[in-house]
Structures are given as structure tokens and as C-alpha cells.
Image (cartoon, grey):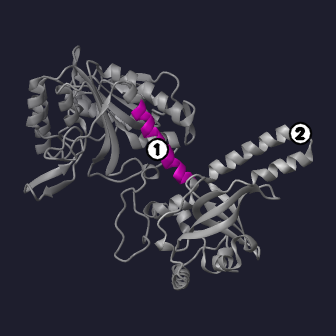
């Protein structure tokens, strides 16, 4: 049996030695094609007139109309169905499987929309072309087909080829019963193969694109303007994270990759752009696991003259809108849970949530000593630099997060962990902030933005002190941002969304790597085509 007679779902797993043998065979075929003046890599274009999914849907619709119109008149029905075969179409795609029936072959061709079967017969395409097709073409090759759509005797909508053309030669065989279908590390490294072999992977990224487009439409319709701000910055602020650092040769200056979009967007609010948002990559020098990737997509938006309650309403409505538009429902599965985005999201203060799930009431804990005693009693580890508000947050992380499966807004965080947020007028130890949790994960983080430059300078001072005590994620003072606040920023609500986590939710993906086309991976040894082992998370 030749390689082309193997169906990609049935062939045995191939060793590296087998792959090298097959590659040599394909290189020999390419050389023979070139000798005959048929170099596929010289083809510059192919005019496509139809896509697989569209052609199948149109044929079914026309066929159904004919059957309904002709009723029991078999002669009329046969003539009408035969007339369907008169329209010549051109498709292009990759050969995914091959069934050799002698002088008639069936191949499956996949384009961006779907697979479609192609019937290739010697009498139709010509004996010389058919011979070259069988001897020098392979599974994985990209081809063009001209012919008509018909239904086979076995009932499959197919293309009856009149002309075929090799458009690109695949020199490496596609995985067959390949370890890459199971080995997630290899799938992520060779995403181009993963997309070919696993249609559901492509579906995830199609949906990702639709999610982002839906978000943009929603915000554009609500008067927001999309902007772009710098990625290379002298002061990476706006979040608690360690930045990546690099050197700008032209300026002979050390710079950082941004960890947030916040401080530049707020400058635009100062400048009078009252509703702005940005969707872009940010970079944090942190670990890699199922929820974190060092570079990820963040969206931040800022709206003048509203507060964190306005941000809650916007978020709830936007999540509901995107789910309905992209998924067709506001109830979406995630793992073993059914997440209901249609009903009102629960709203709890951090103190209420900690009391509910740990039994500890921080409204009665007023001193650092009492907070430390409660932490010791409940085995919550803390550091000497941690203040009462930090310990409240540690309780939240230890006892609450995993229980927040359905959409829940956690509000009113301690001031110690919120350096850019307005204090609550009636409770200055807390700030007007919320985080949205779904499936135990933070989905977004929002504030009533601090616009008091005097207070902001004091917050930066506290961050500098934390930095000096070893907190590598603390913010440095940003004098230009303080200058902008001194010009005057209106009352503003702001929020940051982890786009990747929203995509994970709406595609039922367990790992952030499943929704990043090219996730961060440990580099392979030189000249290595495959990883020695899967990266540890």
C-alpha cells in the first residue's frame, strides 16, 4: 500500500526515521516534477470561485427545492438534478485523505471552511495528468480543482474534477495517528499542524476573533473610541507585576515592556477623550501555567463621569451581549459547570465574601495584630511587610476564589492593594474597586479611578517603600502621570479585562495556551525538531 492510500486517521504512528524516508521520497517527486516543467512553487495564484462549506450548503438547498418542486415525477426530477451538475466551480485546499480505486480516486480536500470529497478520474483529467497525480502527489499537498458539484451513489456531496493542478508540494508528511494529537506540548509548538489536523482548534480561534469583534462593536456603539498607546515605556506601572526590561540603543536608555495600559489611557481622559479603550498585548515577567502566559491580551477602557458601579453595569451587559452574539446563548458550558451570564451577577464586598467562606469577619478586626492572629489561627501565611488589608486579601485568595463559579462581583478592596483607586468616602480603609470572578478566575478588575494628585503621590510613596522592602511587583512613582493628574482628571471609571480568559470561558478551554495561537514555550535544543519532554507548568 502506498503512502497515499493511507487515511490520516488510520495510519500507524511514524518514527523520525520513517518521516525522513518519506521526506526524501517527496523531495524526489518534487525533483521529477521540476524536470517535467511542472514546478508547483512557481504557481503564483489560483482563482477560487467556491468554498467547501458554501458549495455543500448551496447544493443541498437547490436539491431540496428540486425535490419539492418535482414531487413524484421521477423523470423531471432526474433531469433537474442532472442540470445541477452543469455549473463549473473552482476550489483549492489541502489533500487530507486519499482512496485509490484504480482509474478513479477519491480524495478529501480541506479549505478554510470545511472538507469536501473530490472524485478524480483518468478519463476526465487526462491520462498523463492522472498518472502524475497518482505517482507524484501526496496527502498534504495543496491543490486546485475545477469541476462540478454532485452527489455520489453513497450520498456524499462531492466535486467531480475536470481539471486538477498542484499548487504547493508538502515535503513533510502530515501527522497520521500522531503523538501530536495527544501531546499538548507539540501541538502548541507546531500550531500550524494542530490547525490542520484538529478542526476544533481552528474553531476556537475563529470564535476568538468573533469575540473580539463583538466587544469592539459593543464599545463602538456605546461611544467609546479605540486608541493605541506605547508598549515600550520608561516606567511600567498600572498593575502589580514584574516587567521585562530591554535597552533602547538609539536613546541609550533602559526601557520596559508595558505591564498595563492604564496610565496612558488616563492621560487621554485628562486630554478630553471621555471614553477610550485599547485592546493590546501586555507583558509580565511571571510564571507560566494554565491561567498565565508572560504575554497576553488585555483590554482596558476608561469612561469619564462614572464610577465603579457604572463599570459593573457595562461589564455585565457586555459579557451578556458577547455571549449571545457569538455563542447564541447566555448559558455557556465550562468544564462540569453551566455558567449563566443571563441572570444578574452577584455582588459581594470582599469582607462579606471572606466571612461567608472562612467564617472570619474582618469588619471586627481593626488592628494589624488582630489580623495577624487570625491568619495564624487559619494557617494563612503572610510576610512582615503585609498590613491588615494585605492579610484580608490573603484570606480571600485562600478561602474564597475557588467558590466563585457563577459570575460574582467582589467589591471594596483594602486600600493597601489598590494604589490607583479612589477611597470610599465613608470607609477610607477601602476603595471603590471590584473584580469579576467566573469559574474561580478573575475576569476583570475595575476602579473608581483616583484623580487626586496629592493622594496619588502618597500612594506612589507607599509603593516605593514596598519596593524597597523587596516587593518586585510594586509600582514606581510616575512623575509625568502625576503632572497629568495635576492638570485635572474628571471623575472616571476604569476597567481591565483579560481577553484570553473571556475566550477560555466562551470556548470551554481549560488552559490559556488553548486560546493563544503561539503560547510562550521553553526553547528547544539547537537542531531539535521535537521537545525532549513537555514544559513543566
Q: What segment carries the magenta color?
A: 200-217
- Badge 1 marks a residue whose secondary structure is helix
**Relative to 102, 88 lies left or right:** left
Residue 359 in view (yes/no): no
Relative to 79, is 378 above or below? above
Pinpoint residue 411: horizontal percent, then vertical percent: 34, 24
Q: Report the disc number at residue 71.
A: 2
Residue 11 in view (yes/no): yes
Q: CA distance from mark 2 to mark 1?
A: 44 Å
- Mark 2 and mark 1 in contact? Answer it, CB < 8 Å: no
List the residue tagged with mark 1: 208
Which quadrant holds residue 449?
A: top left
Number of numbered labels in the structure image: 2
Q: Nearer the viewer, residue 264 or 416?
A: 264
Relative to 20, is 87 above or below? above
Pinpoint residue 442: horizontal percent, then vertical percent: 38, 36
Q: Residues within 10 Å of mark 2 (few under 14, many from 20)?
A: few
Quarter of the picture containing the C terminus is bottom left
At 82% from the left and 47% from the top, the residue drawn is 80
Q: Main secondary structure of the magenta part?
A: helix
Relative to 96, is 422 above or below? above
Relative to 341, is 165 above or below? below
Query: Is 232 inside the magenta-drawn segment?
Result: no
At 12% from the left and 34% from the top, the residue drawn is 481
Query: Is 208 inside the magenta-drawn segment?
Result: yes
Pinpoint residue 275: horizontal percent, then vertical percent: 28, 26
Q: Nearer the viewer, residue 501 or 27?
A: 27
Amino acid at each position: 500500500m502506498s503512502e497515499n492510500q493511507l487515511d490520516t486517521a488510520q495510519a500507524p504512528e511514524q518514527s523520525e526515521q520513517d518521516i525522513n524516508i518519506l521526506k526524501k521520497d517527496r523531495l524526489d517527486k518534487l525533483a521529477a516534477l521540476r524536470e517535467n516543467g511542472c514546478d508547483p512553487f512557481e504557481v503564483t495564484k489560483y482563482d477560487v470561485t467556491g468554498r467547501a462549506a458554501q458549495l455543500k450548503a448551496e447544493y443541498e438547498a437547490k436539491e431540496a427545492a428540486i425535490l419539492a418542486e418535482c414531487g413524484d415525477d421521477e423523470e423531471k426530477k432526474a433531469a433537474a438534478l442532472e442540470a445541477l451538475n452543469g455549473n463549473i466551480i473552482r476550489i483549492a485546499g489541502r489533500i487530507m485523505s486519499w482512496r485509490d480505486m484504480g482509474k478513479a480516486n477519491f480524495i478529501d480536500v480541506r479549505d478554510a471552511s470545511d472538507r469536501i470529497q473530490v472524485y478524480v478520474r483518468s478519463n476526465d483529467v487526462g491520462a498523463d495528468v492522472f498518472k502524475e497525480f497518482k505517482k507524484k502527489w501526496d496527502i498534504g499537498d495543496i491543490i486546485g480543482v475545477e469541476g462540478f458539484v454532485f452527489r455520489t451513489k453513497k450520498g456524499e456531496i462531492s466535486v467531480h474534477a475536470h481539471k486538477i493542478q498542484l499548487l504547493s508540494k508538502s515535503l513533510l508528511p502530515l501527522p497520521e495517528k500522531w503523538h501530536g494529537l495527544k501531546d499538548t506540548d507539540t501541538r502548541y509548538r507546531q500550531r500550524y499542524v494542530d490547525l490542520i489536523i484538529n478542526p476544533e482548534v481552528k474553531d476556537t480561534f475563529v470564535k476568538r476573533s468573533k469575540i473580539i469583534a463583538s466587544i469592539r462593536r459593543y464599545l463602538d456603539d456605546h461611544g467609546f473610541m479605540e486608541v493605541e498607546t506605547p508598549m515600550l515605556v520608561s516606567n511600567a506601572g498600572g498593575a502589580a507585576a514584574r516587567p521585562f526590561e530591554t535597552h533602547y540603543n538609539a536613546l541609550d536608555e533602559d526601557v520596559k515592556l508595558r505591564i498595563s495600559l492604564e496610565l496612558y489611557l488616563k492621560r487621554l481622559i485628562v486630554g478630553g477623550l471621555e471614553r477610550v479603550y485599547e485592546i493590546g498585548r501586555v507583558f509580565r515577567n511571571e510564571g507560566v501555567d494554565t491561567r498565565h502566559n508572560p504575554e497576553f491580551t488585555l483590554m482596558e477602557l476608561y469612561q469619564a463621569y462614572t464610577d465603579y458601579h457604572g463599570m459593573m453595569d457595562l461589564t455585565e451587559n457586555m459579557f451578556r451581549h458577547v455571549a449571545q452574539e457569538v455563542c447564541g446563548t447566555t448559558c455557556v458550558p465550562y468544564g462540569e459547570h453551566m455558567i449563566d451570564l443571563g441572570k444578574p451577577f452577584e455582588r459581594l464586598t470582599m469582607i462579606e465574601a471572606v466571612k461567608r467562606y472562612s467564617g472570619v469577619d474582618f469588619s471586627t478586626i481593626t488592628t494589624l495584630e488582630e489580623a495577624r492572629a487570625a491568619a495564624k489561627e487559619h494557617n494563612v501565611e503572610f510576610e512582615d511587610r503585609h498590613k491588615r488589608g494585605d492579610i484580608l486579601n490573603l484570606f480571600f485568595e485562600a478561602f474564597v476564589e475557588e467558590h466563585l463559579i457563577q459570575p460574582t462581583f467582589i467589591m471594596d478592596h483594602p486600600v493597601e492593594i489598590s494604589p490607583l483607586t479612589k477611597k470610599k468616602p465613608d470607609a477610607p480603609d477601602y476603595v471603590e474597586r471590584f473584580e469579576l470572578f467566573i469559574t474561580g478566575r478573575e475576569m476583570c478588575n475595575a476602579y473608581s479611578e483616583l484623580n487626586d494628585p496629592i493622594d496619588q503621590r502618597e500612594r506612589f510613596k507607599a509603593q516605593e517603600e514596598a519596593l524597597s522592602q523587596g516587593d518586585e511587583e510594586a509600582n514606581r512613582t510616575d512623575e509625568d502621570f502625576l503632572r497629568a493628574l495635576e492638570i485635572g482628571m474628571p471623575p472616571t471609571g476604569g476597567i481591565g479585562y483579560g481577553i484570553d480568559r473571556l475566550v477560555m470561558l466562551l470556548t470551554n478551554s481549560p488552559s490559556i495556551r488553548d486560546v493563544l495561537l503561539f503560547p510562550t514555550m521553553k526553547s528547544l535544543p539547537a537542531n531539535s525538531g521535537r521537545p525532549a519532554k513537555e514544559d513543566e507548568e
